Image: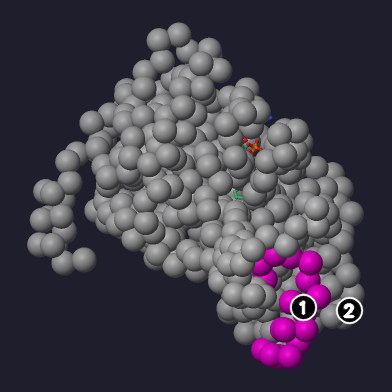
């Protein structure tokens, strides 16, 4: 964007960032203002049910104290959302689109501020955080476009009678997010929900509560009715209150499989639909005829984005035996060059894991892999950057493991860290059987120059998203979601409109009632 235009736009948008004082350096951001938001603004709780420390992964310091919402606060947020639903659902698609496009415009202007806040709370590199903010903006722009296209069908019936269908919103939707893509998840859930005319109460992960409230402020500033998009903070208890609330029309959840099952049970008791975006243990299959350079780059993209904390990661890398030595040599060489450290520095490619317990859990998987006979080719150690202010951060070196077998814990369980397990294979038939031998089915990838084989393989892979000759590309125009235990429903793409709306059939009689009585 040309600088002049950028400055003009900046001037037209009042500051949102009063709560943050920062200087784009880890260890300096201060967060003082409340992180809950309902109605028209942030809400300070006077008698919070529970407070919890939020950490900066890069330094290990306490960033702020999170106030958890209890029944009273959840009720208040729901009431605001219900009021907003009455207004928003009656607006035309063009009117809703106008607000959403304005929100996207503000996000574009605030890209750097949002990305920095995300880095400070989540630990991922600033380069990736900027792309997450872009994805959030693009998603809102995309669904703003679709908001104008929602329409029903006209069906001619005998005798001049007819029926038509109306695509209507569901009501107040609840969104519950994970900690790995906090701002992006908030946008991926709210954009289709709002485009369809719903309002939303969103609960971020208590580990990363900082940026969703920025999205709430942006929607409000863009002209959304008061209460359209609300943030309630908290953990499991707050999440359960939301799922059980009688006014909720739908629950859209991103998180782990065990929590997803509980969400589905809670929603089932109220006969409420769910979208579940859950975990994965995805396969990446590299055939001997692959372009090796691209296959190695693909394997790195499949494993090391966001410190490996990505649901769709291709963590089981199956390599055809003929090219295994060359593949391992190159993948290890490149992994060793990944710049790990302060996530706010431009050159950093791997920041800090999200918190200390999670880092310990990931390192535990590596110890277990060694015990079970796998070989660590590089990384897998705690990492302490040279900068003294980062010494208590949650860093580790990215890890490549070989000598893996299908029954090892590192191959069967979602590690959710920068750990690539490499497995040799011989034939297409064999690798397909092994790739599908998991209860999960979020994503999968194949590298080959044989176009027929590529399509034959993806046809037989049990996964919601398959990549051919690349990995972890998530354009907002295409659906994303899981097969098997990896989830229900989709995010992104046109189809998601169906998950945030319902169809009403209207039958119109043009003649007399032909009564049987
Ligand atoms: N498929 C996807 O699109 C996708 C995207 C990102 C992350 N994930 C998955 O998320 C997981 C990591 O995230 P996490 O550790 O935050 O997951 P988690 O399941 O522990 O928590 C997710 C959210 O659910 C809330 N929660 C926990 N228990 C709850 C309950 N009983 N009722 C209601 N809410 C409850 C948490 O507070 C949090 O906001 C990984 O398994 C990852 O694969 C999936």
Give x and y (percent) for residue 361: 69, 36
In the rendered image, is residue 447 in sight? yes
Give x and y (percent) for residue 36: 41, 27
Give the left or right position of residue 162, taking residue 315 as reference: left
Distance CA(mark 1)–CA(mark 2): 13 Å
Q: Which residue is mark 1?
A: 459
Q: Which residue is mark 2?
A: 429
Label 2 crowd (10 A; few <14 / some 14-19 / many >=20): few
- The residue at the far top in this view is 47
Residue at the image point whose x is 88% and y is 70% from the top: 433
Task: Quadrant for the N terminus, please.
Answer: bottom left
Q: Are marks 1 and 2 in contact (CB under 8 Å)?
A: no
Residue at the image point whose x is 62% and y is 79% from the top: 469
Q: Which quarter of the picture shows residue 515?
A: bottom right
Residue at the image point whose x is 45% and y is 50% from the top: 197
Q: Which residues are magenta?
A: 449-466
Question: Relative to the observer, which residue lies in front, 91 or 293?
Answer: 91
Q: Please count the marks in the image.
A: 2
Looking at the image, is 218 positioned above or below residue 76?
below
Looking at the image, is 372 positioned above or below residue 244?
below
**Magenta span has 134?**
no
Q: Quadrant for ligand 1?
A: top right
Residue at the image point whose x is 19% and y is 39% from the top: 15
Give the left or right position of residue 136, taking residue 17 as reference: right
Give the left or right position of residue 415, taking residue 126 as reference: right
Question: Relative to the observer, which residue lies in front, 324 or 4?
Answer: 4
**Magenta span has 460?**
yes
Give x and y (percent) for residue 104: 32, 55
């Amino acid at each position: 964007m040309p600088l002049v235009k950028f400055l003009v736009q900046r001037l037209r948008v009042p500051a949102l960032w009063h709560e943050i004082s920062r200087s784009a350096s880890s260890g300096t951001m201060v967060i003082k203002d409340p992180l809950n938001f309902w109605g028209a603004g942030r809400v300070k709780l006077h008698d919070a049910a529970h407070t919890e420390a939020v950490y900066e992964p890069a330094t290990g310091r306490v960033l702020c104290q999170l106030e958890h919402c209890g029944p009273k606060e959840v009720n208040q947020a729901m009431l605001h959302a219900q009021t907003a639903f009455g207004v928003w659902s009656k607006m035309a698609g063009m009117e809703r689109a106008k607000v959403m496009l304005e929100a996207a415009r503000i996000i574009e202007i605030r890209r750097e501020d949002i990305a920095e806040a995300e880095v400070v709370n989540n630990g991922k590199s600033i380069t990736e955080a900027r792309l997450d903010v872009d994805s959030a903006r693009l998603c809102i722009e995309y669904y703003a476009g679709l908001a104008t296209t929602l329409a029903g069908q006209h069906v001619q019936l005998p005798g001049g009678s007819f029926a038509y269908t109306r695509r209507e919103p569901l009501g107040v939707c609840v969104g519950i997010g994970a900690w790995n893509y906090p701002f992006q998840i908030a946008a991926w859930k709210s954009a289709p929900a709002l485009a369809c005319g719903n309002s939303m109460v969103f609960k971020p992960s208590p580990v990363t509560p900082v940026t969703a409230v920025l999205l709430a402020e942006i929607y409000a500033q863009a002209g959304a009715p008061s209460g359209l998009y609300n943030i309630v903070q908290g953990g499991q208890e707050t999440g359960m209150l939301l799922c059980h609330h009688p006014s909720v029309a739908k629950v859209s959840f991103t998180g782990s499989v065990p929590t997803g099952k509980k969400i589905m049970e809670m929603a089932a008791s109220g006969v409420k639909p769910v979208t579940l975006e859950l975990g994965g243990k995805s396969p990446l299959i590299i055939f001997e005829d692959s372009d090796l350079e691209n296959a190695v780059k693909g394997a790195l993209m499949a494993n090391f984005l966001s410190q490996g904390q990505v649901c769709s990661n291709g963590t089981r890398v199956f390599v055809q035996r003929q090219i295994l030595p060359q593949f391992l040599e190159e993948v290890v060489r490149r992994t060793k060059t990944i710049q790990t450290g302060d996530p706010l520095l431009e050159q950093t490619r791997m920041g800090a894991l999200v918190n200390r317990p999670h880092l310990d859990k990931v390192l535990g998987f590596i110890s277990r892999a060694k015990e079970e006979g796998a070989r660590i080719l590089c990384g897998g150690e705690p990492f302490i950057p040279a900068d003294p202010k980062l010494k208590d951060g949650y860093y580790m070196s990215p890890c490549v493991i070989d000598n893996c077998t299908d029954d090892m814990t590192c191959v069967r369980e979602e590690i959710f860290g920068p750990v690539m397990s490499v497995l040799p294979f011989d034939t297409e038939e064999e690798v397909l059987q092994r790739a599908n031998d998991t209860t999960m089915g979020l994503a999968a990838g194949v590298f080959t120059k044989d176009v027929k084989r590529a399509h034959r393989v993806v046809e037989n892979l049990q996964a919601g998203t398959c990549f051919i000759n690349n990995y972890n590309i998530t354009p907002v125009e295409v659906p994303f979601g899981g097969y098997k235990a990896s989830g229900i429903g989709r995010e992104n793409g046109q189809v998601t409109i169906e998950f945030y709306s319902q169809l009403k059939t209207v039958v119109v009689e043009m003649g007399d009632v032909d009564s049987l009585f």
